[in-house]
Image (cartoon, rainbow, N blue to C red):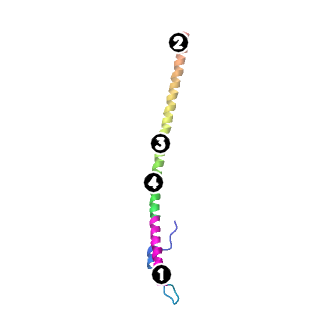
Amino acid sequence: MEKLNLTPDEILEKQFQVDFKGYSASEVDSFLDQVLEDYQKMEDNVQELLDHIAELEAQIKMLNNENIELQGKQKAFDLSNTTSYSSVDLLKRLSRLEEMVYSKK
């Protein structure tokens, strides 16, 4: 993030020299007061947004961790289901083989 040229204090404390056909000091001060107010609001908004970004990044990190955990559980579940299906298939094949062997006797 780029650094700003002015701080609210610098705007507030800025003094202009009065020349013979210069600007009205009260108008300049009034305008700078408005600029200062907007500048402070902008700084507050930026800080609020940065805080919100930090909260969202923390949420993303937490959700990514949960996602990784759930993917691990899903893989374990898939492996256990694959193993149980293989065991059932083996038992069926064994049963058929036993029937064939015992039926020939």
Badge 3 vs badge 1, beta-carbon distance below 8 Å: no
Q: Pointer 2 and pointer 3: residues touching (CB < 8 Å)? A: no
Tell which tag, 2 or 3, sits nearer the viewer. 3
Name the foreground residue: 65 vs 102. Answer: 65
- Secondary element type, mark 1: helix
Q: Is residue 10 visible?
A: no
Residue type of the residue flagged with mark 2: Tyr
Which residue type carries mark 3? Leu
Is residue 41 visible to the viewer in this orientation of the structure?
A: yes
Q: Which residue is mark 2?
A: 102
Q: Depth-wise, is mark 2 or mark 1 nearer the camera?
A: 1
Q: How many marks?
A: 4
Q: Amino acid at mark 1?
A: Glu
Label the magenta part by its dominant secondary structure. helix
Distance from the alpha carbon under mark 2 to that under mark 4? 66 Å
Which stretch did the figure color magenta? 24-45
Please give the name of the residue rendered at 46% of the width and 74% of the height, measured from the top-left corner. Answer: 34
Measured in 3D between alpha carbons, the distance from the residue under mark 1 to the one under mark 4, in whole angstroms, is: 47 Å
- Label 4, secondary structure: give it: helix
Specify the amino acid type for callout 4.
Ala
At x 52%, y 18%, the residue is 95
| Chain-order first, disc 1 or disc 4 | 1
Q: Secondary structure at mark 2?
A: helix
- The alpha-carbon separation of the residues under discs 4 and 3 comes to 18 Å
Q: Return the disc, 2 or 3, that comes first in the chain's sequence.
A: 3
**Of residues 84 and 41, which is closer to you in this image?**
41
Q: Secondary structure at mark 3?
A: helix
Q: Which residue is mark 3?
A: 70
> Magenta includes 79?
no
Precedes in sequence: disc 2 or disc 1: 1
* Alpha carbon distance from label 2 to label 1: 110 Å
